[in-house]
Amino acid sequence: MNVNRLQRKFQILLLAAGIAGGMFVAGCSSKDVRQETVATVNGDEIKGTELREFLGVPGGVFAVVDIPVERKKEALDQLVAVRLLAQEGHSRGIDNTPEFKEILLRNDPLVRSKALVLKEIEAKLKVTNEEMKAEIAKVKEANKGISDADAAMRAVKSVSGSRVQKIQEDLIATAKKETSVPDNVVLADRDLTMRALAAYAKKQGVDGSEGYKAMRQEMERSILRDMVADNVAKNVEVTDKEIEADFAKKTVSLVPAGTKIPAGMVAMLKERIRAALRNGKGKTAIDAYIDELRKKAKITVNDAVLPKV
């Protein structure tokens, strides 16, 4: 398991938009679609907020009723796959291993920061149905022939993108001002930002909050998912024969007949081919593994909620 790879992935998720994963809906006293269960996987609930976020809505704070139900089901299917892999990891006891605990501990500042960012987004990001419909119309006008589903997906990102960026910029500026994190030029800007956000989140009492607990649970699922998936994919093999066949197929149309390719370039291309074939086989193996988990799982979908998500 590549610890640094996982850390980088979560940093990108946080700083780019802060929208991946489940999020506690802070300050909601009455039940709304965000809090409704859209599916259960062996009793583990997936809420409307999580599906909205997966569809691109920061914090799940506004509805995406214009995205077709079928597209929502496709997204929900991916969330179910995450649950299945995480549950499998738990059943194997992976969450009790030193490796898992080390990764979780290293990513705790990210959990804390993400909880703070999403709390701000929930409090400040407001998008109405009228704004969404107007943005969808603009997307369709600018992209003739685009499907309704793709237009709605693009509109979601467009209508919230600049607003989320402004919310994050203001929060980061406040965090840097209110914390004692040194502005050390040795640190990358992203690392400095992460340290400031984590420190400010702790100062704001995020630790122990429902939002923090939700983010930590999502982090745990993600780590378990990746560890199980990596374990499945590591068993795939790529033969020299497969590499040679793919190499021949790719070079025949790119290199003039009779041209000799330098040995160094041949080696580089074959390594790239090996990596690509391995990734492809790994994905196929993981998909097959998930299919087997589905067969044994009890999965229910609340079709009545999906149109309102």
Image (cartoon, grey):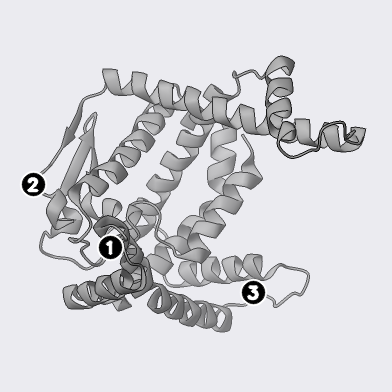
Q: Are marks 2 and 1 in contact (CB under 8 Å)?
A: no
Q: Provide residue 154's location: percent of width, then percent of height.
A: 35, 64
Q: CA distance from mark 3 to mark 1?
A: 40 Å
Q: Provide residue 87's location: percent of width, then percent of height.
A: 36, 29
Lateral position of residue 291 relative to residue 39, left or right: right
| Sooner in the amino-acid sequence: mark 3 or mark 1 | 1
Label 1: which residue?
152
Q: Residue at x 26, y 65 (%)?
A: 26
Secondary element type, mark 3: loop
Q: Nearer the viewer, residue 4 or 164?
A: 164
Q: CA distance from mark 2 to mark 1?
A: 20 Å
Q: Amino acid at mark 3?
A: Val
Q: Nearer the viewer, mark 3 or mark 2?
A: 2
Q: Amino acid at mark 1?
A: Ala
Lateral position of residue 248 relative to residue 104, left or right: right
Q: Amino acid at mark 2?
A: Ala
Say few, some or many: other residues with alpha carbon within 10 Å of mark 1 (under 14 / 14 to 19 / 20 or more).
many
Secondary element type, mark 2: loop
Picture quadrant where residue 221 is located: top left
Query: In the rendered image, is residue 161 in sight?
Result: yes
Q: Nearer the viewer, mark 2 or mark 1?
A: 1
Q: Provide residue 255's location: percent of width, then percent of height.
A: 79, 38
| Sooner in the amino-acid sequence: mark 3 or mark 2 | 3
Label 2: which residue?
304
Label 3: which residue?
181
Picture quadrant where residue 240 is located: top right
Rendered view: 232 above or below 166: above
Q: CA distance from mark 3 to mark 2?
A: 48 Å
| Sooner in the amino-acid sequence: mark 2 or mark 1 | 1
Q: Residue at x 40, y 54 (%)?
A: 20
Q: Nearer the viewer, mark 3 or mark 1?
A: 1
Q: Residue at x 36, y 73 (%)?
A: 142
